[in-house]
Image: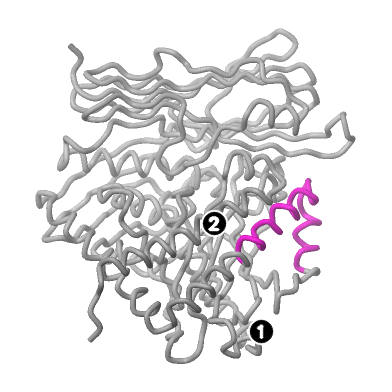
Amino acid sequence: MKRVDAAELEIFKNLFHSTAEEMGAALRRSAFSPNIKERRDYSCAVFDGEGRAVAMGDHMPVHLGSMPMSVAAALNALELGAGDIAMLNDPYAGGTHLPDITLVMPVWPEGNGARNTGHGTRDSGLEMRKALRVGTQSLEVSKRPAARSSSKAKGGPMFYVANRAHHADIGGAQPASMGLSEEIYQEGLRIPPVALARGGKIQRDVLAILLANVRTPREREGDLMAQVAACRLGERRLQELLQTYGTAQTGFYLEQLQSYSARLMKEALAKIPAGTYSAEDFLDDDGHSAEPVRLRVAIKIRRGSATVDFEGTSAQRPGCVNAVSAITYSAVFYVFRCLLGENVPACAGLMNPIEVRAPEGSVVNARPPAAVAAGNVETSQRIVDVLLRALAQALPQRIPAASSGTMNNLSFGGIDPRTGEPFAYYETIAGGMGARPSSGGLSGVHTHMTNSLNTPVEALETAYPVRVRKYSLRRGSGGEGKFRGGDGIVREIEFLAEVRGSILSDRRQFAPYGLAGGKAGRTGTNQLTVKGRTRKLPGKAAFNAPIGSILKIETPGGGGWGKGQ
């Protein structure tokens, strides 16, 4: 039996991670939209020949933890040959919400004959139906990618590379595809796993269907080709790695990284006092009614393992806050990975000691055709909040207070008077970080499931017919305590064109909680001024704004930690 060399294990971990990071750099620098090239709303990852995550770039947790389900759906639905690239965005086939388009590409050792691999979907649509069920099954099943034949034994791919990017419009009723909705059909173009490329050639008919259903086709094609370029770069880097180290050694360390990550998680869980830790928190509403949405969790820790049970969480709602199972799994993955530190390999093995239970038909495991646009961005944040609140009972000196707890999603679109062409804008706006047991929270940052940036003023005003009137920290919005929560942001935008817009935000009613006696952070506010008259907008709202209207968003601050002096 080959002996594991600790130095070689670390080398391979970093080689795989650097591949994902370089893919991300290529995607960002090639993209057309400010949402990707400025805000960095994308993620890249490397998977082994069985579809298990091996490495993830330092990108967006909400993308990365859920991406294995998209890879599984693509592999179940399609037979991918060399140079093929699968595309999908269906939340009920491993996706998150419709603007997030995922590409998946197989990687073989160069020169092994894989260039002659056949193509075509599998017989009678059976595998497609299996893929479409991935997101609706209980998480104990759907968290594990579908079994694939061993790449080493049967000559299949050695790796898969994948990336996901949020496209600023994917069609639907609202510009930027992030508005209020009551079923997924209103939210945009829904793409099951399909082949975007075959044998290295883009399938123009597939691309044409997508571009015919969006408001900004040139930008969409540019962003999509940036994703294609990132996949092809990942393929080249992994083939170079295989040429250097060979398939045997590489395959050995692929397996060892999975075992290593599982062992690290098991050891971390063993240090948590045994017991069951429960908590609940609420979303303000679902955008359809004013009724709060309960999220409840019980985390049972036993002998180096954990069971995370969301029994008692609200049933799926008519509004768009529903999260598919991939989102819930992603949030659990993120929280428990945070217990280990950033140098631990982001492998599928991390979740081996953790069982996730999410009731089907609940807001954390929605069934089609539930609307899901805000589930990815808002419910994911609240899942993190409730998980951390529960773990704070077991690890009071390690868990921070609640951060802003919302991505403050703003989208709008119309006709740009400078060009006469349609435009669609989307961004998330940062808030305050929760204070920590050893220090205060940071101000004006994206936290937890988002790891993006705010669009710079210069980029925003160049790309869109708007003027940024104010962009500052919201002083005093962080909760008081021994350590103060970070402050939120004030973003004030004047529209220089007539627009239709939407806001999907939260923590406008239920404030970010403090811990250990710390005070809650301040809730956020939204307001729109039209022809000198100002009105308050709810947390989830659609609006029409004529030229000269001013939108002001104040984001929540983070909770404080510890009793103040």
Label 1 residue SS: strand
Depth check, mark 2 against mark 1: the one in front is 2
| Residue 545 marker | none
Residue 8 quadrant: bottom left
The x, y position of residue 170, in whole percent, is: 69, 50
- Residue at (44%, 58%) from the top-left corner? 56
Which residue is identified by label 1? 120
Query: Relative to residue 524, is residue 24 depicted above or below?
Result: below
Q: Amino acid at mark 2?
A: Glu
Q: Residue at x 37, y 23 (%)?
A: 486
Residue denoted by label 2 = 22
Q: Is residue 230 magenta?
A: yes
Residue at 41% in and 41% down: 381
Q: Quadrant of the N terminus?
A: bottom left
Q: Is 336 left, or right, of 20 in this rendering?
A: left
Magenta segment, principal secondary structure? Answer: helix
Q: Secondary structure at mark 2?
A: helix
